Image: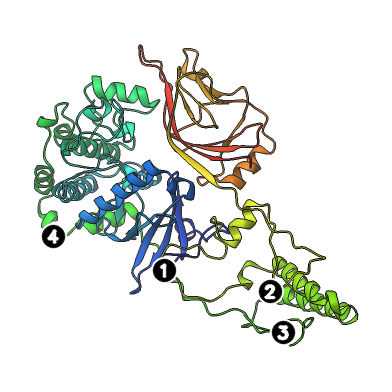
Amino acid sequence: MKSAAEVFQPLGADDPQVVAGYRLAARLGAGGMGQVYLSHTQGGRPVAIKVVRPELAGDASFRRRFHREVEAARRVRGAYTAELIDADAEGTPPWLATLYVPGPSLAEAVARRGPLPVPAVLWLVAGVAEALQVIHDAGIVHRDMKPSNVLLAADGPRVIDFGISLASGVTRHTTTGAAIGTPTYMAPEQASGDEVTAATDVFALGQTAAFAALGRPLYGDGPSLSVLYRIVNEAPDLEELPEALRPLIGLCLAADPADRATPAEIVEWCRKRLGADADDGAGPAVWQEVTGPEVEVPAPVADPTPVRTLSAPSSPWAPPQVTAPPAGPEEEKARRRRRALIAAVAVVGAVALGAGAWTVSNALDSSRGRSSAGAASDGAKPRASASSGPASGAPGTTAGTAKGSGGATTGGGASGPSQPRASAPGPVKPTAYTFQLLDDKKSVSLKEPTQREDATGDIRFTCNGRPADCQLESETSVLAPYVLGPGADLEKCRLVLTTARSRTLSLTAVAAGSEICVKHPSGDIALLVVQVKSTAAVPRVPGFLTADMTVWRAS
């Protein structure tokens, strides 16, 4: 199990303090869709809050996808799923809250300790199969069952993330021939773009069980297209699996969906192999061995108390009276500097009465800008809609304006006609473009239309017949990978692009989730979040890359 410091990371300067009335206690993770935070219900139950990135929230197709996730999660209730508590798919930004599951994902547990023992795999498969029963009974096909979407709680697994699920009876919601899911864990019919049914999830469950038992994907690693080719055209090699698990996993991985076991049959099969342990409640002991002791969850964040009250000045040049609760050393130093500056300006104001009011007001604002971020708060209760805290950086907030304009802020007070106040420019607004495809014929441009049906765009995909030679290249723009963890934004891309000079980027180390920053000579900056990369040299099947792209114009 990870330490508390690894699981619960402190909020950063760009993180909101409150989302739709939920006070955030820590950051849990980040990805291409957005950030995930720890919060609590009014009764103190911990919840995970997923907040969509602002630029994606403005994309209509992404909102439809997120709305599907919310609706699917609303319909699913079961012992082995993470229950949806609250959500607003139409919020600004969209968000959802599920019960927080204290435990690592199956992918994390296997990466840390290696393959799971056979009894743990049986408990795992039984729990996930029961979750699939509930999901399928709600008329939903998950479509992205994989180790990272299975959390290992102290009392068993939890299935999460319905982001690409769809209602039963709908074969696909993408363009003809497109397959959505994680390539390594797709079923043959899913990889081929054919009809997706509940049996598709069973195939993915078999692959997930094999991963737990082997410590690696059953169909091997490597480029996505190579893995998909093996899934569609080759029978799985079960010889390296523990003998006790081969029949079960074989039933899940039948090529014909009609030949696969049902979730109910899988649960019954596992219970028979577990024997008396299935009725004696031995599961938690197995999970304790796999996950280790639980990490203590941080306590709920208390509502803030008012930090500062400003009373009206008694004269045009007198500084406002400030009252505040006891401050720490750094804030006290800032306050002393502020008082000294205000006092000095007040003296000047006494001599030059006409200019005093403007000078004092601006001096106060300037000194505020140098104080700590926690020194200014209105102490208001959270509203019932999604909101960013003082340091959220969201468009429309003071912090967002400062971030988008290089830190410029405006002060309070009245300005005379002889000394006009300069207003800060508005924040740079991002534009999101989902599912951008690059291959030997299609390219991507930073200007609209972004998807080009030829190679005339700013960013092209080339392979020259060899996987090792696959790269992104541009005649106009600089490309740089963002390797400091997920969650790149405009400021982070600006940072990595400061010293970047290359107009080519090798795809050797690029994988799903990788982030690539791009700068155009016009000043436009873009962020590519890779979804699928295939650089396999498979006959008659060219390589390709798909990515979600965000563009900040003339930034």
Q: Where is residue 358 in the image (x, y as percent from the top left)?
A: 78, 72
User: x, y percentage for residue 191?
Assistant: 27, 27
Q: Residues within 10 Å of mark 3 (few under 14, many from 20)?
A: few
The numbered mark, 3 or 2, whose residue comes first in the sequence reads: 3
The image shows residue 272 at horizontal and vertical percentages of 8, 47
Look at 28% across and 25% down and name the residue there.
177
Q: Is residue 140 visible?
A: yes
Q: Name the residue under label 1.
A: 21
Residue topped by disc 4: 280
Q: In which quarter of the image is residue 192?
A: top left
Q: Position of residue 511 (x, y in %)?
A: 45, 33
The residue tagged 3 is 313
Q: Which residue is drawn at 25% across and 23% down?
A: 232
Q: What amino acid type is highlighted by mark number 3?
A: Pro
Q: Quick one: quadrant of the N terminus?
A: bottom left
- Residue 238 makes an appearance in the image: no
301 up-or-down from 456: above or below: below
Relative to the observer, which residue lies in front, 352 or 533? Answer: 352
Q: Which of marks 1 and 2 is nearer the N terminus?
A: 1
Q: According to the image, label 2 marks what residue?
A: 331
Colour treatment of the image: rainbow
Side of 324 where 530 appears, left or right: left
Residue 48 found in image quarter = bottom left
Which amino acid type corresponds to the residue marked 4 in the rendered image?
Asp
Q: Earlier in the sequence, mark 1 or mark 4?
A: 1
Q: Decide which of tag 3 and tag 4 comes sooner along the chain.
A: 4
Residue type, mark 2 in image: Glu
**SS type, badge 3:** loop
- Disc nearer the start of the sequence (1/3): 1
Tell me which amino acid carries mark 1: Gly
Above or below — where is 322 with respect to 387? below
